[in-house]
Amino acid sequence: MGNHELAGLDAAALRTLCANALRVLAIDAVQAANSGHPGMPMGMADIAEALWRHHLKHDPADPAWIDRDRFVLSNGHGSMLLYALLHLTGYALPLTELKRFRQLHSLTPGHPENHLTPGVETTTGPLGQGLANAVGMALAEKLLAAEFNRPGHTVVDHRTWVFLGDGCLMEGISHEACSLAGVWGLNKLVAFYDDNGISIDGDVRGWFRDDTPARFEAYGWTVIRQVDGHDRAALDAAIEAAKASDKPVLVCCRTQIGHGSPNRAGSADVHGAPLGEAEIAATRAALGWTWPPFELPEPVRLAWSARERGAVLRRQWQEGFARYAATHPELAHELLRRHARHGSPTPGVEAALSAAIAAAEAKGANLATRKASQELLNAVAPAMPELLGGSADLTGSNLTDWKGHKALTGTGTGNHVHYGVREFGMAAVMNGVALHGGFRPYGGTFLTFSDYSRNAVRMSALMKLPVVHVFTHDSIGLGEDGPTHQPVEHVASLRLIPNLDVWRPADAVETAVAWREALRRTEGPSALALSRQVLPHAGEGGDRSESIARGGYVLRRAASEQVVLIATGSEVGIALAAAKLLAGEGIAARVVSMPCMDAFERQPGAWRDEVIPRRLPRLAIEAGSTSAWWRWVGEDGDVMGLDRFGESAPAGDLYRHFGLTAELVAVRAAQLVKARSVAPALVSQ
């Protein structure tokens, strides 16, 4: 069929061709890579055509347009569907990149990555998290609309659309996030469920028999049931109904995985493997597709292009925003500022941070670092309207609220979120909020429950999102709750995540600096590990904020130093007390506080060597896993920590039981000094 014949196609036939273009691009790219997932793109192609060509508000020329609709491919293994959509609608994703699917340094990796491919809103692949990100995006839209829209001026008005599959719904995070979406009444959120009945292991009825529509209705969603995912009229009607709903919407689309493949459609065989040349040829014949691999007829390309329509939509919004700015100039300026990609703190916020740090040093109070964190929020939050806090049902323990905060309600207003007991959902929703723009989210839970949220924490690091994870009750110091709640390996484990800054501050000043650095950070998340118990003030009155910011610094010096004590968090106080005991024995000890190994590792080697001289024996102390510390003490050094689970007892008893006392630290340090004097290590200055 030539282009001249296509020119006479009716609208229905053209829509079929447009959907089939998605199918053949997917199977061609997967075949070229000899790797990938063709089944989902083939099955959801008709849904994608209905949404992207007829309803999605976007402009391929400006993927960062503030009021664009957000599209999330939660079932991210079907990434070729999204890449085909982006290419065809006019994003900066040329055909050459589709041909390089899953190849090194291509713009078309195996799963979508938001920092890599124009038009990709979030990195997906770990199932369920894209759906949770979408909940965060829809929440951000609702909060911004309530804050900035004015009568006659609707400048925030867009939807979040999600594609998801059985795997997303089997993951528990889908329950956490979708339950919250119902509570919050996120009526701009629409999810399309690819109900094809197949997962990697085969027919899902063997392991997934949930009544999904009833489940979502129980959450408070509108559910549009039994939509034929290959019937354009049914899809159009469902989308229109979804747009009219006053609740979040689940559109249940019955589809056939691998639709169009004569011999593999409807089976697990088409889920995650190339079709092969013979089956591709048979599929082309079944679809009536006569063009070679990666070749598309011009009428189909023209029909898919969204550049003209997108430019009109964006221009209309810009004209409306100009009228808004003329009437509400301060609001307009603030909305644009808030959407600047992860902008640094304003001068007002920086001033509040500086004042809070100076006040904490001057006050010199003995304070639990979780309480010091709340005091910092009390000082800074009023100057930072984009700050969106929260806790997973532990607000009174995490102390993530502040004076004057307003709890989020279903009305769409508030700046503190009660996530309920949903640690994983909280972390993934915060990622969605950060991805949307307009807010700087943070959320709290106990450090031991970072295990629940860990994969979303990892995703925030992978996506370079400036989310702040507040983890309190950071050691055996929480006491009587026992080993189920006492984190031992958690700080060490979090330190393994690339691009995550893990702060474990020793006092109120270090806590305030940790917050400052987390809020200044624009290309990655931070985790604050904070104590339940009161910790002694570590400073001596001087300004140490810039030294703290470098991750590790000399807290106490001594003349003719013989040993270095390195500690973090609650153990810094123990190290300081041990140094005094050693001084009484004639041993001069340097005390180094290392609140953030990640920041310390980024410092020049000269700084690190000056802080921790290799010429001196070194002893590290931390109430947790010892594994990360050996790098800093060397083979001739020593580490005092906890490489076993804790016990249930008062905190003081536990520290004595596990040998983490100033007296025992002094003994171990003295042994190091004695060993060095007997057999000096061959180390350089």
Image (cartoon, rainbow, N blue to C red):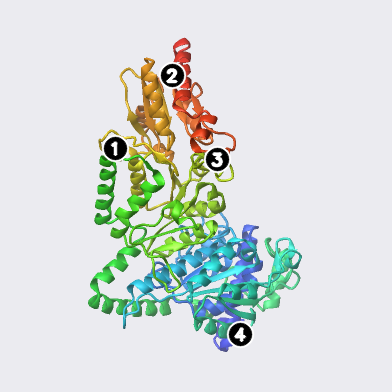
- N-terminal of the pair, mark 1 or mark 2, is 1
The amino acid type, in three-letter code, at marker 4 is Ala
Which residue is pictured at 40% across the width and 52% down the height? 523
- Residue at the spot of label 4: 234
Callout count: 4
Please state, as top left, top right, bottom left or bottom right, where the N terminus lies in the image.
Answer: bottom right
- N-terminal of the pair, mark 2 or mark 4, is 4
- N-terminal of the pair, mark 3 or mark 2, is 3
- Residue at the spot of label 3: 489
Left or right, residue 188 beside residue 350: right
Tell me the crowding category of disc 3: few under 14, some 14 to 19, or many 20 or more residues within 10 angstroms, Cα based. Answer: some
The amino acid type, in three-letter code, at marker 1 is Arg
Q: Distance between the residues labelled 1 and 4?
A: 65 Å
Which residue is pictured at 30% across the width and 19% down the height? 559
Please provide percent x and percent y for residue 148: 33, 73
| Residue 683 image label | 2
506 vs 205: above or below: above
